[in-house]
Amino acid sequence: MSTGTSAKFAASPELVFETLSAYQRSAALRAAIELDLFRAIGEGPGDVASLAGRCAASTRGIRILCDYLTVIGLLAKEDGRYLHTPTSAAFLDPRSPACIASIARFLGNPVLYEPYLRLTEIVRSGRTVLEGGGTVEPENPVWVEFAHSMAPMMAPMAAPLGTIALNGSSGPLRVLDIAAGHGLFGIEIAKQHPEARVVALDWAPVLEVARGNARAAGVLDRYETLPGSAFEVEYGGPYDIVLLTNFLHHFDPRECVRLLKKVNGALKRGGRVAAHEFVPNDDRVSPPMAAAFRLVMLAGTVGGDAYTFREIAAMYADAGFERVSSHALPAGPHTVVVGHAA
Amino acid sequence: MSTGTSAKFAASPELVFETLSAYQRSAALRAAIELDLFRAIGEGPGDVASLAGRCAASTRGIRILCDYLTVIGLLAKEDGRYLHTPTSAAFLDPRSPACIASIARFLGNPVLYEPYLRLTEIVRSGRTVLEGGGTVEPENPVWVEFAHSMAPMMAPMAAPLGTIALNGSSGPLRVLDIAAGHGLFGIEIAKQHPEARVVALDWAPVLEVARGNARAAGVLDRYETLPGSAFEVEYGGPYDIVLLTNFLHHFDPRECVRLLKKVNGALKRGGRVAAHEFVPNDDRVSPPMAAAFRLVMLAGTVGGDAYTFREIAAMYADAGFERVSSHALPAGPHTVVVGHAA
């Protein structure tokens, strides 16, 4: 994605044409993932006939699709054969441990996708066209899909977030993981700290995914689940650490403060909240991924946004948190914002 | 659009995420055009409240949309106000004579858009999921939309194409404009050459758009229309020049040769056919716009493709044309391929 102010761009009708055609890029990559094309590329030899055979697809379709993916930087072509780029080898071939191809299922989910077909109406009204609260409606099944398919993209952020949230703690720790989803963030705390006990809060069907991941990570004996709405369920506690991962951005500032007050009330004195967020700069147009993410909140929620650090710090202060700090994660566009209960 | 072989790209999960989210770019630009946002930007002062008022939209929606458009290079932001970039000033503000914003209506037309929701199925089968011949089905109303909304994007190519097709001709000329659409190419010939008479061939409802443009250009007295299918209707003639603009790519090579033979039969000896095409290089992955366009043909047709010059020259030769030459147009991704009737 381009970063941007005017000076960087010469006048270009191509930019207009390509932006209006950009939906084709998403469709092409989604189709390639669904056809298991990137596995076939990795296994070689990469000529059209072999690829068509492995993907059970037409030669015309494979030839045009592979050329298109080459144009957009997701394959390479040499002497008529298709090869991985560094990106497709690492992140799209299912044989790679870093593969994130599953995110196509979440990003291509109709609940996320369809509001964009009515974006004009959304900009007019200022809220999602989805019913009720949009993507944050109770028990929305899209979060089960999220828990399954977005985990590989979130996984590299879990270890650094865990280190930031633990901040060298020792001894028994109680941790609440709000909107746990796949559970990877809370599970990581349990992995890094053998005396941590984690309570994961989310909708019941989502918690089944988190429990499966906790079992696989060998921490199920220190892992509990708490089904329900983060705004309504009794948290228990008191906790040493509360994780709020990819959650605040779904709500308006008033709702965020209400939630943060509830979190504060469930923390021990001096305990920490750690929010994992897209945090744009004060200009709200950089860095590009964090800034662009705000459109997703416009399309899918009633009042959500990705907040600047200044805004999050103000909400933390309103909710009674002290010593608020920002920690950019090394890989990816996310930031962890930590506050301490008074 | 990036051009591409592997060496140019470092491994990037962002590229995967952004490609799968690229449909949001198309939706954002389409919404901005539908809201007449770029006119409001041009008229200033460009703060969120004024823009929301002018566009009859919410402040939340305008704020997030304008920031998003800034991230993707289609607006600039300074001190909290939004301004044009060179691209949006020239090509998106309706007050600019070069404005091409209307192409959003064609590129966002469901007939073009919806096949991408089923692209996996299309790659498997090798043909469009649209009924019959897809976008080239007889009387498909999408071509009326094309004639109306794509004309501003095609207009800058008309003059250089006219010059190439006329090639210094003098005296009375008969010209057949196959798949005339908006008619701008044939009309341009009539404008450049006062002794040229043009016959425009297309579906009847499309020809109404072309006639309107011929009237506006003051050449209606030398402009006739011929409604029907280019494959079936009797061309009349003989002609000095036949224009085949943005047409061959909808068909497979066998059909192209059949059509070109019919064209040859309607030309005087030594007469010229001039095709206006996306012509990728032999590698089929460059230049990017011509190469990427082939996906549109996969999605929307049964056997179409954007052909290399080598392939077009072979088809021309099969159809009996001689002295085949390629002429890249100065602005934009198109090429004119000229052949001469033996």
Image: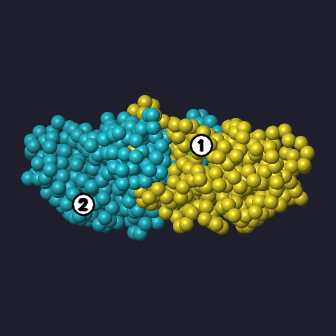
Chain colours: A yellow, B cyan
Label 2 sits on residue: B206
Please state the horizontal and vertical placement of residue A278, each as a whole percent of the image: 62, 45
- Classify residue A225 by image quadrant: bottom right
- Chain letter of disc 2 in the image: B
Near-viewer residue (B41 or B328): B41
| Element class at badge 1 | helix
Q: Which amino acid, mark 1?
A: Glu
- Residue placed furthest toward the bottom: B131
Label 1 sits on residue: A311
Near-viewer residue (A207 or A20): A207
Residue at figure coordinates x 87%, y 46% from the top left: A193
Residue at figure coordinates x 81%, y 49% from the top left: A268
State the separation of the CA atoms marked 2 and 1: 54 Å
Give the label on residue A229, or none: none
Please state the horizontal and vertical placement of residue B9, each as a whole percent of the image: 59, 36
Residue at figure coordinates x 73%, y 51% from the top left: A264
- Classify residue B265 by image quadrant: bottom left
Characterize the local packing of mark 1: few (<14), some (14-19) or many (20 or more) Cα atoms within 10 angstroms: some
Q: Which amino acid, mark 2?
A: Val
Contact flag, marks 2 and 1 (Cβ < 8 Å): no
Residue B72 position (above or below residue A304): above
Please state the horizontal and vertical placement of residue A294, each as a whole percent of the image: 54, 48
Q: Are marks 2 and 1 on the same chain?
A: no
Q: Nearer the viewer, mark 2 or mark 1?
A: 1
Q: Is residue B228 left or right of residue A272?
A: left
Residue at figure coordinates x 44%, y 45% from the top left: B66
| Element class at badge 2 | helix
Q: Is residue B285 left or right of residue A34?
A: left
Query: Can residue B33 be seen in this snapshot?
Result: no
Please state the horizontal and vertical placement of residue B47, each as a whole percent of the image: 40, 41
Near-viewer residue (B332 or A111): A111
- Chain letter of disc 1 in the image: A
